[in-house]
Image: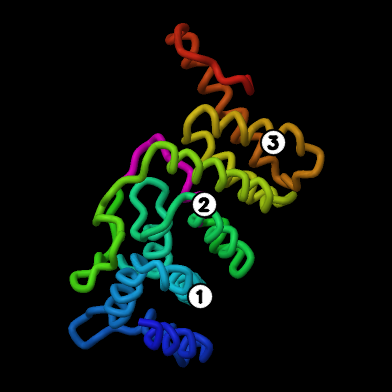
Amino acid sequence: PRAFLDAVETSIGRGSEGAARLLNEATDMGGSPHVELLWALEGLAYRADCWRRVADVLTDLASADITGSHANHPYRSLANMLHPIVPSSTTNAMERIQTVARVFQRRPEIGWRLGLDTIPDMMGGLVFPSHYPEFNIPTGARAHGQQVSDEDYLTQVDGTVTLLLQHVGSDGDRWLSLVDRALRSDVEIETRVLNAVDADRDNIADTHGALWAKIREALAWRIRHAATNPDDARPDWW
């Protein structure tokens, strides 16, 4: 597998003439020639000696995937690999947090998207684990679809929120996307993010007022909800 990864990394270095070219091509039958490449990478994510390189390759491919229109695309493979509940890789919470931090360093926009997608969405969502190796399954590899422990999950989510708050800066659009996701998450994350907004309010470039409009909208909904559900807990940020 190391020789394969060497070849893929070299090919990615060739830009649009390398492996990234597969992302925007179609076969005569309407298929996508990059799918087999992703399956190979997804399988190697279960190997302790390969998963870090796989994450780097998927990050680079995700950055080159302009359309992202396929059901199988590099970003989804990367997100599944680092999923906080059912990770398609043999990694622990700290390794996944460190990987997201590395993605932030190498490809900031991919890192931001990845961080947001790690925050649990209480509105629900489906999880489809990535391709699992059929042969030569590494010793100690996580079983296909195996969930992490509650402690592992909470550690990863907490660490990822910390990363997002470190990288949000004064960008109003980033703050808006972070608040929007936090408002659809659990009350602890919601409170933590909104407290951060309050602490940094004078530095946020919310030119068109979209961030504060979002917060006022959320507050108005909670006031209406509290009027008909007086026994429900109220977040500290009220």
Residue under the image location 61 percent in, 70 percent down: 106
Viewport quadrant of the N terminus: bottom left
Mark 3 crowd level (few <14, some 14–19, many ≥20, 10 Å Cα): some
Closer to the camera, 157 or 212? 157
Q: Check disc 3 and report the residue beneath it.
A: 196
- Sequence-first tag of 2 and 1: 1
Residue 209 in sight here: yes
Q: Tell me the tag on residue 60.
A: 1
Q: What amino acid does circle 1 point to?
A: Asp
**Residue 44, x across and y down, in percent:** 34, 72
> Mark 3 and 1 residues: CB-CB less than 8 Å, in contact?
no
Asked which secondary structure carries label 2, the reply is helix
Residue 107 position in % (x across, y down): 59, 68
Q: Magenta residues? A: 114-125
Q: Of discs 2 and 1, which sits in the foreground?
A: 2
Q: Is residue 59 above or below residue 186?
A: below
Q: Nearer the viewer, residue 210 or 175?
A: 175
Q: Which of marks 3 and 2 is nearer the N terminus?
A: 2
Q: Left of 108 or right of it: where is 65? A: left
Query: Can you name the residue that lies furthest to the right here?
Result: 202
The residue pinned by badge 2 equals 94
Residue at (81% x, 39% y) in the render: 202
- Give, as a three-letter code, the residue at label 2: Met
How far apart in space, not on screen, are marks 2 and 1 (Cα)?
22 Å
Given contact means CB atoms under 8 Å apart, are the residues at marks 3 and 2 in contact? no
Residue drawn at (40%, 83%), measured in percent from left and top? 2
Q: Where does the image place residue 219, in percent across and percent down from the top left?
A: 58, 24
Check the image and report above or below for 99 versus 122.
below
Tell me: 148 left or right of 212.
Answer: left
